[in-house]
Image (cartoon, rainbow, N blue to C red):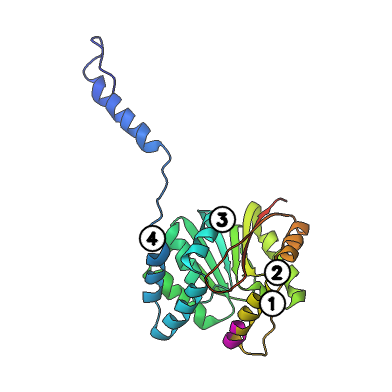
Amino acid sequence: MRPASASEPPASRPRRALLSLRARLARPTFDAPEVYGSAAVANIVRALPLVERAYSRIRFSILRPKLLSVMDLLLTDEGRILDVGCGFGLFAAYFGQTQPRRRIVGLDPDARRIGLARRVAEQLGLRDHTFAVGDIRDAPLEGPFDAAYVLDVMHHLPPEDQRRVLERLRDALVPGGVLLVKDITTEPLFGLLFTEALDRLMIGFDEPLAYRHHREWGEMLTELGFRVRMVRVPDILPYPHVVIAATKTR
């Protein structure tokens, strides 16, 4: 604070101090991430029933904090974000803890999983998260969304549905919105076979599996009006992870 001049009335000094304080408080502030990494994962696991805890540990052993951190940086840090195939709400809970200004809308066809997702969000204090029962192929999408993410879901859709789902997500995003796709690419072959064996162990042999090379996803998203960036994320286990960040350009 500058020193008061001799001609300045003493009564104006408190007012000037108050105006200075108001100006400082009016400057934009940013919320620091509350919880991240293994601490965020531990919070989520504790919020689940015993049986689902085992499943969550498997999911977080596949999508490790390092991989989640990459996706966390690519997502918008606030606004409405659609979680496609949210399941128990594991990743909605994770991304909600790292950036509290995110308002995540989870969608999953399994009503029981949606119930658990709501329970996890409530226990973690993520009151702006909402969850609905529905299939991304035909469920009503109450957009617009600032971002959307699809984590290891696309290869569980039949090939004829994959493009249509991406079109629906594009139409639900605001201009400049981000679509984040985490999936499995098809090389190296050993990594693909390793992942497929684990997928079959989880879902059986009756469900479809339709993997694509990451360049195919990139070409498809470019045709749909996205600007695309891709990164391969190495892992201790031989999962051929690929993260695709697509920004809507029109």
Which mark, by number, is residue 157? 1
Local crowd size for mark 4, using a 10 Å CA cut-off: few (<14), some (14–19), many (≥20): some
* Residue occupying the far left of the picture: 10
Q: Which residues are magenta?
A: 198-202
Cα distance in 3D space between marks 3 and 4: 17 Å
| Residue 117 position within the rendered picture, expressed as x and y whole percent measured from the top left | 47, 74
Which of the two discs, 4 and 2, sits closer to the camera? 4
Q: Which mark is residue 74?
A: 3
Q: Which amino acid type is marked by label 3?
A: Leu
Q: Which mark is nearer the camera, 2 or 3?
A: 3
In the image, is 98 to the left or to the right of 180? Answer: left
Judging from the image, what secondary structure is the residue with disc 2 in? Answer: helix
**Disc 3 to disc 1, C-alpha distance:** 24 Å
Mark 4 or mark 2: name the one nearer the start of the chain. 4
Q: Residue at x 41, y 72 (%)?
A: 44
Q: Quadrant of residue 4?
A: top left
Q: CA distance from mark 2 to mark 3?
A: 21 Å
> What is the number of the mark on residue 35?
4
The amino acid beneath tag 1 is Leu
- Name which of mark 2 and mark 1 comes first in the sequence: 1
Task: Name which residue lies at 57% across and 72% down.
Answer: 107
Position of 164 with respect to 74 (left or right) is right
**Disc 3 secondary structure class:** helix
Per the model, the C-alpha gap separating discs 2 and 1 is 9 Å
Q: Given the image, on which type of amino acid does mark 4 rest?
A: Val
Closer-to-camera residue (140/236): 236
Membership of 199 in magenta stretch? yes
Residue 101 appears in the rendering: yes
Amino acid type for the residue under numbered disc 2: Val
Q: Position of residue 11 (x, y in %)?
A: 22, 20
Q: Are marks 2 and 1 in contact (CB under 8 Å)?
A: yes
Residue 37 painted magenta: no
